[in-house]
Image (cartoon, grey):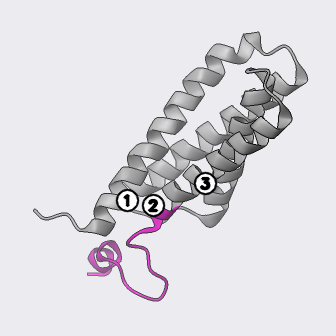
Amino acid sequence: MKISASQACRYLATLLFLYLGAQGLWSACVQFDDAVTLGQRVQTAMQFGFSALGLAAGAFLVLERPVPVAIEWAWTITLALAGGIAAVAWGETSIPVGIVGGVSTALVALAIVWLGRRGRVRGHVTETDARETS
């Protein structure tokens, strides 16, 4: 069985969504009681958010369904906010470092979303769609 490049991209995105979702959920649960400051509480909430959204996105891809755009954007935003706020709230770094961390995290998140969108072309029938209609 030969795997196409678009399938490989989607498989990688599925693994990354599920891994980040599971790891984020575990970490948020562990740090929940230690979140004392407002920044730490907000970051933990963002972590729970991107975890749930990542697991949902991974589930869509496992089921060979396109991830809704709203989930993709919400996941990207919550992941970027969690990454940026964590540097400041937990790492006690400066706000500019947090901004760089958030932007960097957003770029990685967008790359994962892009991987998950491979094989999903507007106006064209994908292999999965063709199997479902036959």
The amino acid sitting under disc 2 is Gly
| Quadrant, the C terminus | bottom left
- The nearer-to-camera label among 1 and 3 is 3
Sequence order check, earlier mark of 1 and 3: 1
Disc number placed over residue 116 in the picture, else none: 2
> Looking at the picture, how far across and down is residue 68, in whole percent?
58, 64
Label 1 element class: helix
**Disc 1 crowd, CA 10 A, few/some/many (<14, 14-19, 20+):** many
Is 117 within the magenta?
yes
Which region of the structure is painted magenta?
Answer: 114-134
> Looking at the picture, how far across and down is residue 90, in whole percent?
75, 20
Label 2 element class: helix
The amino acid sitting under disc 1 is Arg
Lateral position of residue 95 relative to residue 34, left or right: right
> Disc 1 and disc 2: Cα gap in Å?
5 Å
Q: Residue 40 is drawn in which quadrant?
A: top right
> Which residue bears the numbered disc 1?
10
Disc number placed over residue 107 in the picture, else none: 3
